[in-house]
Image: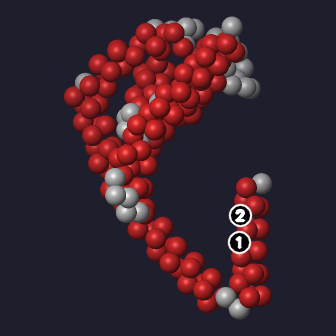
Amino acid sequence: MLNYIWAGMILLGVIYGVCTGQMSALTGGALDSAGEAVSLCITMAGVMALWMGLMEIAQESGMITKMTKGIRPFLKFMFPRLPEDHPAGEYIATNLIANVLGLGWACTPAGLKAMEQLAKLEEQRGKKVTAASNEMCTFLILNISSLQLIPVNMIAYRSRYGSANPAVIIAPALVATLFSTIISVIYCKWKDR
């Protein structure tokens, strides 16, 4: 459906440009936007490489393992039916830690692996996986609520587009994501009962 909406908006823009004689402005705008998109992608690739490298260093140094042990009580509270040493627990912890550090792109592979492991857990329990389990739903909701201490993407975007103080977004983002995470925890526990 979203594809149709975008296609319709593009088509309306082209029709409007033709009808008003603004086709050269439309073409120029499209080319400028394409160039800006490439420039933004290069900027974000640099930011992503930096933070992915830091995440890898944290993984190799054992910092992620220590952080995982630190959030284990929270994971046990949120996923009481998840066996203690199940691989999904490690992937969930890695995903949540990457989210807290504001590394949305770094948490995606761990999130996908966590979902795979949770599906395997359901199969081990003798259930056919035709719908998301409680653990899968809880993980997805926590992932979406995404408590962030450092909103790296927003800071990078604001810096790229000339913000005088790109990091000013940290406090409002922390409050908003803390609130969304608290609401998601309450919702998950309420629905889990």
Residue displayed at 26% across by 25% down: 63
Residue 48 visible, this orientation: no
Q: Give the percent coordinates (x, y) of residue 180.
A: 56, 29
* Mark 1 Cα shell of 10 Å, populated few (<14), some (14-19), many (≥20): few
Residue displayed at 45% across by 38% down: 172
Q: Is residue 13 above or below residue 174?
A: below
Dot 1: element: helix
Q: Amino acid at mark 1?
A: Ile
Q: Is residue 4 above or below residue 60?
A: below
Q: Are marks 2 and 1 in contact (CB under 8 Å)?
A: yes
What residue is shown with label 2? 6
Residue 10 badge: 1
> Residue lying farthest left?
61
- Which residue is at the front of the view, 152 or 167? 167
Residue 14, by quadrant, is bottom right
Alpha carbon separation for disc pair 2 and 1: 6 Å
Residue 193, by quadrant, is top right
Q: Give the percent coordinates (x, y) of residue 69.
A: 35, 14
Q: Is residue 56 above or below residue 133?
A: below
Q: Give the percent coordinates (x, y) of residue 108.
A: 48, 39
Give the side of residue 26 with respect to residue 103, left or right: right
Q: Give the percent coordinates (x, y) of residue 60.
A: 25, 31
